[in-house]
Structures are given as structure tokens and as C-alpha cells.
Amino acid sequence: MNPVEVAPVPAPDLREPLWLLEEWLREGEPVPDDFIGKVQDSVQAGDVEVLAARLGGRVVGVLVLAFRPNISLGGLFASIEDLYVRPEARHRGVGAALLKAADERCRGRGIYYVEVQVERGGAGAFYAASGYEPEPDVRVFSRSLVIRDRGDEKPEA
Ligand SMILES: CC(C)(COP(=O)(O)OP(=O)(O)OC[C@H]1O[C@@H](n2cnc3c(N)ncnc32)[C@H](O)[C@@H]1OP(=O)(O)O)[C@@H](O)C(=O)NCCC(=O)NCCS
């Protein structure tokens, strides 16, 4: 039996799973409280789900799934925004269990297309092991905007 338990996190309980992502992505710096409030609103509205994986009751992995409208599909698709498993819990099927749970959450809503952005040299093999395929003709473009009265934005090129 796989001891990994995965479940969606109710909005009021988001702090603990998000702390894992803060540890990984923000060197432990907490996100602002008003941002947590926005994530809670999105979870309550059903636009976002945060799935937590537990081993022995402890949160060891988290997956953030966003549901977005797409005109060509004429419906919603799902995007994996973040996925993280604590280093000491890796290679025990936790990541795969989170992806499987995400599949089930999508199926439950009739959503059949799930995508994720992966850095070169990153988790591609992990996603491939769970049935994800690279989109050969897609590249991601982005830019950073200057927002006046905020000193933390990157300058425009
Ligand atoms: C990627 C990550 C989520 C995998 O989590 P995990 O719990 O270790 O994954 P699993 O144990 O479920 O692995 C499932 C399969 O994926 C593959 N896999 C997992 N990690 C891999 C790696 N680093 N390289 C290649 N294949 C890998 C293996 O085939 C594995 O099956 P196996 O153990 O039977 O060989 C985890 O390493 C992590 O959090 N990494 C840092 C954050 C990150 O890169 N997130 C993804 C952002 S898009």
C-alpha cells in the first residue's frame, strides 16, 4: 500500500502547504498576507486547488493547480503552477501521487488538458514518467513591466 495521502487543502488551511513553496522558491521568506488572502479567494471560488501530500501526517509535497478558460477548447484547462516535494521525501512516489490526484481533480471537472512549464534540465523526466509529453512547437515568451511606486520590479529591457 502506498502510504502517501493526497488531498485538496481547504482555503483556511493553506499556510502550511504554502510554507513548503516559500522554503523552495523564496528562501523561506513568507509571501505577504494579502497574497495569501488572494490565493484563499481563488481556492474558495474553485479557480485554484492546492493539493497536499502527507507521509505519516506530515506535509511533504504540494501541487498548485489552476483552472483557466481557453477559447479554442471552449472550456477550462488545468495548469500546474507549482509542484514541490521535500528533498528527504523524494523518490518515494510522492510527486507521482500528486500528479495522479491532479488528474482525478481534473477528470472530476471534465477537464482533459493539463499543462506545466518545465525548465530545461528540470523535471522533464519526472513528468514524462507520468505520461506528460513535450509540446514541440510551443515556446514561452515573457516580459517584466515597470510598475510605478514599487521599487522591486525588474527594469524593462
Ligand atoms: C520533481 C519532483 C516533484 C519529483 O518528486 P518525487 O516525489 O521525487 O517523484 P516520484 O518519486 O513520484 O518519481 C516518479 C518518477 O519520476 C521520475 N523521476 C523523479 N525524479 C526524477 C529526477 N530527478 N530525474 C529523472 N526522473 C525522475 C522517475 O521515473 C520516478 O519513478 P521511479 O522512482 O520509479 O524511478 C521533486 O524532485 C521536486 O520537488 N523537485 C524540485 C522542484 C521541481 O523541480 N518541481 C517541478 C517544477 S515544474
Image: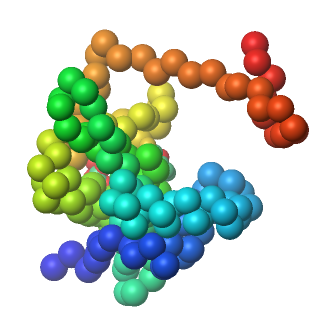
* Point 44% across, 58% down: residue: 42
Residue 27: horizontal and vertical position, in percent? 71, 57
Of residue 13 and residue 136, the one placed in the foreground of this image is: 13
* Point 16% across, 55% down: residue: 109
* Point 30% across, 38% down: residue: 69
* Point 37% across, 49% down: residue: 66
Residue 111: horizontal and vertical position, in percent? 17, 46
Image quadrant where one finds the C terminus: top right
Residue 138: horizontal and vertical position, in percent? 35, 17
- Can see residue 89? no
Picture quadrant of residue 125: top left
Image quadrant where one finds the N terminus: bottom left
Above or below 105: residue 82: above
Residue 145: horizontal and vertical position, in percent? 70, 25
In the rendered structure, the answer to whether residue 107 lies left or right of residue 77 reads left
In the rendered structure, the answer to whether residue 95 lies left or right of residue 132 reads right
In the rendered structure, the answer to whether residue 4 lies left or right of residue 1 reads right
- Can see residue 6? yes
Above or below 150: residue 63: below
The single residue placed furthest to the bottom in the displayed view is: 57
Picture quadrant of residue 132: top left
Of residue 16 and residue 72, the one placed in the foreground of this image is: 72
What colour-coding does the image apply?
rainbow
Above or below 139: residue 68: below
Number of numbered discs overlaid on the protein picture: 0
